[in-house]
Image (cartoon, rainbow, N blue to C red):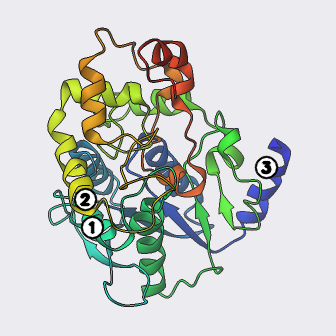
């Protein structure tokens, strides 16, 4: 597999246009800077960050620090949802200062498409992919005319798409400059700024893809971040199709609502630490756009079953 990606990397290095999807995480930030330093003469690059309105404030500050310190023209975009029309999500350009912090893009998406969850995982499509593609089209970049750089590392090969070459997806930290989590963290330790987030916080503050263990830690530390998803469930739970027997849509694994998570947390006396396998930039990130993996609870499966949450 590695040889295939190395060969793909040589082929892609001849391509002129490269869209760099910046999640706001450490891995994608590292990827972006390495690409700028080593490949600017080979690629015409565009850097895009899509804000959902529910990103952690530290993530927004980190993106702004990257564009300022490295003098990188990062395009900040947000979803524009068209209600009452058969028209897909487009974009608007914002800045660090004007970027939504109140969840407006997310709420507009939910108002049209319903609450996202494991059965209806459309938030990445509507809040990340389509706004980014819409922005690129506004710049004259048509789908199929460019490659997309994704920040998946060399120690995450199971998350690499098998059809990456056909989909014109490039994994620079696999094929161009193989790097793992240790490489990324060591590099950031030598930089004048860093992303100041704990492993369980991630870019999207309460992302429904997080493990239950992470959510319980977040409930203890920052219960207010769940105010937004709680309101979404109460106001838009009946929007869109629902699974058989599901009275209304909720966000979290096992068809659990925000209130369910808080109720379960009250019955748990001791939380396990967030495992190393759960660490990283996953959340709503650029890797989520390609093939987000939902299996982080397996590390703590015995504990989850002991407190009645194993299903």
Q: Is residue 49 above or below residue 254?
A: below
In the image, taking residue 134 as reference, residue 153 lies left or right, namely: right
Task: Read off the residue under disc 2.
Answer: 53
What kind of element bears circle 3? helix
Residue 147 visible to an observer of this rendering? yes
The CA span between labels 1 and 2 is: 6 Å
What kind of element bears circle 2? loop
In the image, taking residue 6 as reference, residue 65 lies left or right, namely: left
In the image, taking residue 93 as reference, residue 243 lies left or right, namely: right
Sequence order check: which comes first, mark 2 or mark 3?
3
The CA span between labels 3 and 1 is: 38 Å
Q: Which image quadrant is residue 71 in?
A: bottom left
Callout 3 crowding tier (Cα within 10 Å): few <14, some 14–19, many ≥20: some
Callout 2 crowding tier (Cα within 10 Å): few <14, some 14–19, many ≥20: many
Task: Read off the residue under disc 3.
Answer: 6
Residue 253 point in image, percent of width and height: 45, 39
Sequence order check: which comes first, mark 1 or mark 2?
2
Q: Residue at x 78, y 64 (%)?
A: 11
Q: Is residue 234 above or below residue 298?
A: below
Q: Residue at x 58, y 53 (%)?
A: 38
Q: Do residues under tags 1 and 2 come within 8 Å of each other at their CB atoms?
A: yes
In the image, taking residue 66 as reference, residue 130 lies left or right, namely: right
Sequence order check: which comes first, mark 3 or mark 1?
3
Look at discs 3 and 1 and give the one toward the viewer.
1
Task: Read off the residue under disc 1.
Answer: 105
Residue 242 point in image, percent of width and height: 45, 60
Say which of 108 and 237 sits in front. Answer: 237
Residue 77 visible to an observer of this rendering? no
Say which of 278 and 19 sits in front. Answer: 278
Residue 81 point in image, percent of width and height: 33, 78
The CA span between labels 2 and 3 is: 37 Å
């Amino acid at each position: 597999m590695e040889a295939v990606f190395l060969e793909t990397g040589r082929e892609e290095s001849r391509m002129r246009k490269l869209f760099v999807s910046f999640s706001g995480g450490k891995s994608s930030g590292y990827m972006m800077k390495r690409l700028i330093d080593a490949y600017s003469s080979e690629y015409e690059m565009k850097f895009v960050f899509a804000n959902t309105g529910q990103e952690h404030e530290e993530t927004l500050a980190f993106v702004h620090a990257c564009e300022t310190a490295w003098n990188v023209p990062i395009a900040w975009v947000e979803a524009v949802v068209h209600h009452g029309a058969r028209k897909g999500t487009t974009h608007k350009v914002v800045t660090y200062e004007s970027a939504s912090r109140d969840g407006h893009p997310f709420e507009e998406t939910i108002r049209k498409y319903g609450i996202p969850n494991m059965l209806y995982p459309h938030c990445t499509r509507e809040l990340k992919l389509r706004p980014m593609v819409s922005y690129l089209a506004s710049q004259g970049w048509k789908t199929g005319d460019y490659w997309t750089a994704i920040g998946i590392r060399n120690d995450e090969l199971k998350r690499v798409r098998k059809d990456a070459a056909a989909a014109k997806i490039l994994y620079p930290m696999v094929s161009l400059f193989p790097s793992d989590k240790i490489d990324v963290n060591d590099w950031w330790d030598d930089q004048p700024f860093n992303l100041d987030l704990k492993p369980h916080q991630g870019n999207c503050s309460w992302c429904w893809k997080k493990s239950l263990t992470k959510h319980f830690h977040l409930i203890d530390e920052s219960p207010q971040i769940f105010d937004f998803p709680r309101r979404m469930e109460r106001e838009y739970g009946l929007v869109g199709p629902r699974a058989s027997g599901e009275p209304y849509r909720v966000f979290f694994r096992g068809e659990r609502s925000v209130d369910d998570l808080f109720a379960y947390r009250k019955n748990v006396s001791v939380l396990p630490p967030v495992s190393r396998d759960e660490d990283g930039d996953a959340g709503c990130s650029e890797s989520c756009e390609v093939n987000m993996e939902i299996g982080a609870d397996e590390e703590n499966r015995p504990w989850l079953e002991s407190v009645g949450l194993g299903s």
